[in-house]
Image: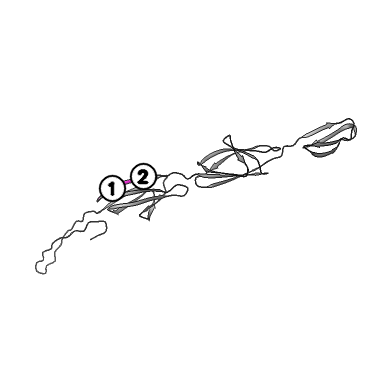
Amino acid sequence: DLSGFSPREIVIDTEDRRPQRYLVSLASDSGKVTFNSTPSGASVFIDGRNIGNTPVTQDRIAKGSHEVEFRMDGFADYKESLTIQSGTVDTMNAALDPKPGSLRIVTIPDGARVCVNNEFRGEAPIELTDLAPGDYRVRTEVEGYEPDVKTVTVQNGRETIEEFRFIKNSGTLQLSTVPAGVQVFIDGQSHGDSKARGANTLSE
């Protein structure tokens, strides 16, 4: 009796005390399977026992039904039943599906409009979930600041955090009043009085 082989009984006739030699062949009671995955490198479990990473070949898998599972970070687990017949030589291939990723967008200052691939998605801070892995064009904009555009890579099964810092729009305004000494307001904020000779230079 040997694991992986069918037991066999034989009848032995003995004569006197002379040694005798018998050659006994055992029939295989197991199978051999090679396990592959796309991408490769997935851990393979047979009935909960880890046998290594793909590509991997397992000899002498006992006859009968077995549960096979492929596991890999960033990918959904792949499960399949495997039935082994005596003497089976087979191959199992698993195509692993990538898990979706997420993207958290933070802006300084808060409240910027966020567009992803030219689609408005809300105002920052914002978290976008269930995104397919890949590159995304992110545009953020807030009044009074230069818009910011980046290409952000989302990885499968992971959260990506991207921060946008804005540069304030600024310019110079030269204002003349007649008479001089007029109080000047821009967007409700006082910027002083116009100077003598009727000219003010204001930065915004």
On the image, which quarter does residue 94 sit in?
top left
Q: In the image, what residue type sits under mark 2?
A: Asn
Q: Disc 1 designates what residue?
A: 89
Give how far across and how far down residue 21 sits, in percent.
15, 62
Report crowding for label 2: few under 14, some 14 to 19, many 20 or more residues within 10 A (C-alpha).
few
| SS state under label 1 | strand
| SS state under label 2 | strand
* Residue lying at the far bottom of the rendered structure: 17
Q: Disc 2 designates what residue?
A: 93
Give above or below for 197 relative to 112: above
Quarter of the figure that contains the N terminus: bottom left
Give how far across and how far down residue 154 sits, in percent.
53, 43
Chain part drawn in magenta: 87-91
Q: In the image, what residue type sits under mark 1?
A: Val
Q: Nearer the viewer, residue 79 or 200?
A: 79
* Residue lying at the far left of the rendered structure: 15
Q: Residue at x 88, y 32 (%)?
A: 198
Residue 90 lies in the magenta stretch = yes
Q: Is residue 5 left or right of residue 112?
A: left
